[in-house]
Amino acid sequence: MYNTLTNMTKKQRESTAKYLYDISKGIALLAIIGNLLKDKWDIPTLIFGSLAALFTFIVAFILEGSINHE
C-alpha cells in the first residue's frame, strides 16, 4: 500500500485525503446517529464505528502530511 501512495501525484493524494476525511465523517455520523435512533445503545457498533472513523482519519492525515513535504 505504501508503494501505491508514493506513486500518486500531488492532486491524487489531495483528492484521496479529502475523500477519506469525508468517509471518516460519514462513518462517525452513522455510528452515533444510528445509535441515537435506536431505543438501546449498541456498544460494539459504536466502538467499531469510532475505530473505523479514526483509522480513515489517520490515513487521510498521513496522506495530507506527505503532500506538505513535497
Image (cartoon, rainbow, N blue to C red):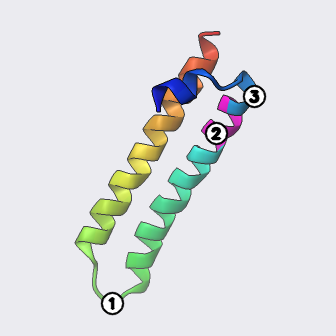
Q: Quadrant of residue 46?
A: bottom left
Q: Residue at x 28, y 61 (%)?
A: 47
Left or right of 53 in this view: 69: right
From what the image shows, is residue 50 above or below residue 44?
A: above
- CA–CA distance between discs 1 and 2? 36 Å
- CA–CA distance between discs 3 and 2? 9 Å
- Neighbor class of circle 1 (other Cα within 10 Å; few <14, some 14-19, many 20+) is few
Q: Quadrant of residue 6?
A: top right
Q: What amino acid is found at the position of numbered circle 2 in the picture?
A: Thr
**Most distant residue in the left direction:** 43
Residue 54 appears at what percent x and percent y? Answer: 40, 46
Q: Residue at x 39, y 54 (%)?
A: 52
Residue 39 appears at what percent x and percent y? Answer: 33, 90
Q: What amino acid is found at the position of numbered circle 3 in the picture?
A: Lys
Confirm whether the magenta stretch covers residue 58: no
Question: Which residue is under mark 1?
Answer: 39
Question: Which residue is under mark 3?
Answer: 11
From what the image shows, is residue 28 above or below residue 4?
A: below
Precedes in sequence: disc 3 or disc 2: 3
Kind of element beneath mark 1: loop
- Neighbor class of circle 3 (other Cα within 10 Å; few <14, some 14-19, many 20+) is few
Residue nearer the viewer, 20 or 33: 20
Question: Which residue is under mark 2?
Answer: 16
Start-end of magenta stretch: 13-18
Mark 1 against mark 3, which lies toward the viewer?
A: 3
Confirm whether the magenta stretch covers residue 14: yes
From what the image shows, is residue 12 above or below residue 42?
A: above
Left or right of 48 in this view: 7: right
Q: Residue at x 71, y 22 (%)?
A: 10
